[in-house]
Image (cartoon, rainbow, N blue to C red):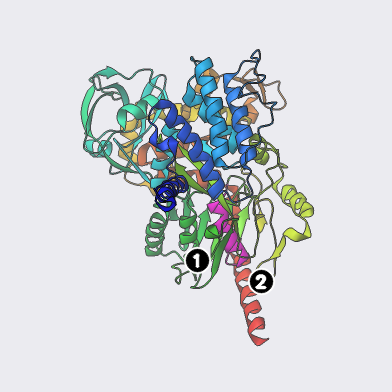
């Protein structure tokens, strides 16, 4: 055999093996079985991180942390690990993915052989979580069950029977059927108690049990037995499951003759379409200006934030930019059209719960002086994630880039400490929102100070500081209000009220929500029922007390203090009644009427917004003259 004939097959084999390795089809893929699947999952995660993470990563550190994860999951302080493949005191220097995988396989098989009682899937999950903990707080592992729920949430719909429910005294209680859904079409009502599902008792179910039994594929059916207040006979329904929309816009309505209001709770696949539907509806009602409420909106899809931002600007306006160590994730995004709202004055409401996509839209509006941002300093999330599915339908979410507002601001807050410290940083901010903003601005270095299009100061490094600061809406003593919410007295009160007075109430009010909103009030007997429910949960009326106090989960308060503070509780219960009769979107107009100081102050700022618009025009005229 010639040398050429000998080398050619070997070279071909080497090329094939190299191609297989580069394509990610190595021995982990071609093996089969439980252990090989677990090992392949581990390798998938490392590859996704190395190939996509926005910052510098070290395969050596990722591997070392994965071994720490194994030991942590074993959770046995008496183990003698010296000299074993999971001895964390050893030098675990690795140079590449193959080296990392081979060493991890050795550690994995050591555990599998020596600790047969261990769930090796949990061992790998612990390794993955420890690896991701070396990155940033938003790069996380998502278990298969949680992945499915998240995908449903951000897809904007799920399949089921279409109810909002609560577990009250171990019984599934319908808060409201979702409008147009299967339950609504069959006449299921708020207050109905579901006591059986498919001939099996549903008493004692938790939330997961309910979703598991009532959700299902479109076209399948489920039998439920319902007890309805004041109806002595149980009602039996066969419900055919269908697509149920999960709306991301809580409500839209007119605040006055020319001011629209839209509240967005997150950014999912359907948000932009929902937003345009709301906008068109409000325009039909005469909207000439808009309040956009992003409070407690944690964000979501970047694409949806961009699409909504575009609606406020003319074509060619810079919306956002992203930067990463991987050039494929770097981009500058400009509006591709003249937005439907480019000429409408806008005020945006934000708070410490506004994050990510909410901050992208608010940042673009603020940087271009397009409108006022009102409320409290936002969360401060300036990172973009991509979700990657693993071989067992679990997922990892990996940060692929930073995003920057049009002025160049990175609004990401620091994350040098633990994930818990990072997540709960907002709870440690100064309670006075103005003082919090002032302290933050004083600490911001010159490198994180920027200018808007009109020359106003804005700041990076810790969320968006609103143009106008408004204190928390519950600055009045929260004891009575919070005690009610914690003990769910508002929900139980409304449920009992409808059980007793539901028919008469619906006859009088159901066909005229605006009349209810403007003129309904609780009677003296209703108030006494409320007091009795509060007393059942531990409220004590004590005339000798100076200030409301909580002791051993009991609230002590004088009757005078109760009468002074009860307006908040009454407003909340009125809103809850609206929710249970008309649906969730009707909760917000009522609660905004009674408990929304930020919105109240925002409605007095339209003159300031107009001055901002004039400032932009003068700046543009001066620039063109030069």
Q: Main secondary structure of the magenta part?
A: helix
Instruction: Name the quarter where the C terminus is drawn.
Output: bottom right
Taking 613 as reference, is 303 above or below it? above
Element class at badge 1 = loop
Instruction: Please give the count of numbered marks on the rendered protein.
Output: 2
Dot 1 surroundings within 10 Å: few (below 14), some, or many (20 or more)? many
- Residue 296 seen in the figure: no
Q: CA distance from mark 1 to mark 2?
A: 17 Å
Question: What stretch of residues is rendered in magenta?
Answer: 354-371
Residue 555 locus on image (x, y percent)? 62, 22
User: Does the magenta run of residues contain 393?
Assistant: no
Q: Is residue 520 left or right of residue 535?
A: left
Measured from the top left, where is residue 218 in percent x and y? 25, 39
Q: Which residue is mark 1?
A: 312
Q: Which residue occupies the foreground of this view, 463 or 36?
A: 36
Q: Mark on residue 582?
A: none
* 486 relative position to 186: left or right: right
The residue located at (37%, 59%) in the rendering is 281
Instruction: Looking at the image, tell me whether mark 1 or mark 2 is earlier in sequence order.
Output: 1
**Percent of width and height locating residue 130:** 60, 33
- Residue 398 can be seen, yes or no: yes
User: Label 2 belongs to which residue?
Assistant: 454
356 magenta-colored: yes
């Amino acid at each position: 055999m010639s040398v050429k004939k000998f080398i050619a097959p070997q070279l071909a084999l080497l090329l094939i093996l190299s191609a297989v390795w580069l394509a990610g089809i190595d021995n982990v893929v071609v093996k089969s079985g439980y252990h090989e699947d677990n090992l392949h999952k581990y390798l998938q995660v490392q590859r996704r991180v190395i190939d996509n993470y926005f910052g510098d990563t070290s395969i050596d550190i990722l591997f070392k942390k994965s071994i720490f994860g194994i030991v942590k999951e074993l959770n046995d302080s008496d183990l003698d690990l010296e000299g074993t493949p999971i001895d964390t005191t050893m030098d675990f220097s690795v140079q590449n993915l193959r080296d990392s995988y081979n060493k991890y396989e050795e550690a994995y098989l050591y555990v599998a052989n020596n600790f047969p009682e261990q769930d090796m899937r949990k061992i790998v999950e612990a390794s993955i979580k420890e690896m991701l903990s070396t990155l940033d707080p938003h790069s996380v592992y998502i278990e298969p069950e949680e992945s499915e729920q998240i995908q449903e949430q951000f897809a904007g719909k799920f399949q089921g029977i279409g109810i909002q429910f609560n577990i009250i005294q171990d019984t599934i209680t319908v808060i409201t059927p979702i409008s147009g859904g299967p339950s609504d079409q069959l006449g299921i009502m708020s207050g109905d108690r579901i006591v059986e599902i498919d001939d099996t008792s549903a008493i004692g179910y938790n939330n997961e049990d309910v979703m598991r039994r009532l959700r299902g594929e479109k076209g399948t059916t489920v039998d439920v037995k319902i007890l309805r207040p004041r109806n002595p006979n149980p009602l039996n329904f066969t419900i055919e499951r269908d697509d149920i929309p999960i709306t991301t816009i809580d409500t839209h309505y007119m605040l006055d003759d020319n001011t629209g209001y839209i509240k967005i709770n997150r950014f999912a696949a359907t948000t932009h379409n929902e937003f345009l539907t709301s906008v068109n509806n409000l325009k039909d009602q005469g909207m000439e200006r808009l309040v956009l409420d992003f409070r407690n909106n944690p964000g979501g899809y970047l694409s949806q934030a961009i699409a909504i931002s575009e609606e406020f600007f003319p074509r060619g306006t810079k919306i956002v930019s992203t930067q990463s160590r991987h050039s494929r994730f770097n981009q500058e995004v400009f509006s591709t059209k003249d937005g439907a709202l480019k000429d409408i004055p806008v005020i945006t409401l934000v708070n410490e719960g506004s994050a990510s996509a909410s901050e992208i839209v608010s940042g673009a509006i603020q940087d271009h002086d397009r409108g006022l941002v009102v409320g409290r300093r936002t969360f401060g999330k300036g990172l973009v994630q991509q979700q990657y599915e693993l071989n067992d339908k679990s997922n990892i979410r990996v940060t692929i880039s930073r995003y920057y507002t049009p002025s160049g601001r990175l609004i990401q807050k620091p994350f040098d400490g633990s994930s818990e410290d990072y997540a709960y940083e907002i709870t440690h901010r100064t309670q006075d929102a103005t003082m919090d903003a002032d302290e933050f601005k004083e600490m911001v270095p010159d490198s994180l100070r920027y200018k808007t299009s009109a020359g106003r100061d804005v700041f990076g490094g810790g969320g968006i500081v609103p143009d106008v600061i408004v204190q928390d809406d519950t600055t009045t003593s929260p004891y009575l209000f919070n005690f009610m919410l914690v003990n769910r007295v508002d929900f139980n009160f409304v449920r009992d009220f409808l059980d007793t007075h539901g028919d008469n109430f619906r006859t009088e009010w159901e066909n005229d929500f605006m009349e209810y909103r403007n003129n309904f009030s609780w009677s003296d007997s209703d108030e006494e029922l409320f007091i009795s429910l509060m007393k059942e949960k531990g409220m004590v009326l004590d005339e000798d007390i100076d200030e409301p106090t909580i002791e051993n989960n009991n609230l002590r308060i004088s009757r005078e203090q109760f009468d002074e503070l009860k307006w908040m509780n009454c407003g909340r219960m009125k809103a809850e009644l609206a929710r249970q009769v008309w649906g969730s979107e009707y909760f917000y107009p009522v609660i905004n009427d009674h408990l929304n100081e930020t919105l109240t102050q925002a409605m007095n700022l339209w003159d300031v917004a107009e001055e901002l618009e004039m400032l932009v025009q003068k700046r543009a005229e001066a620039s063109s003259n030069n």
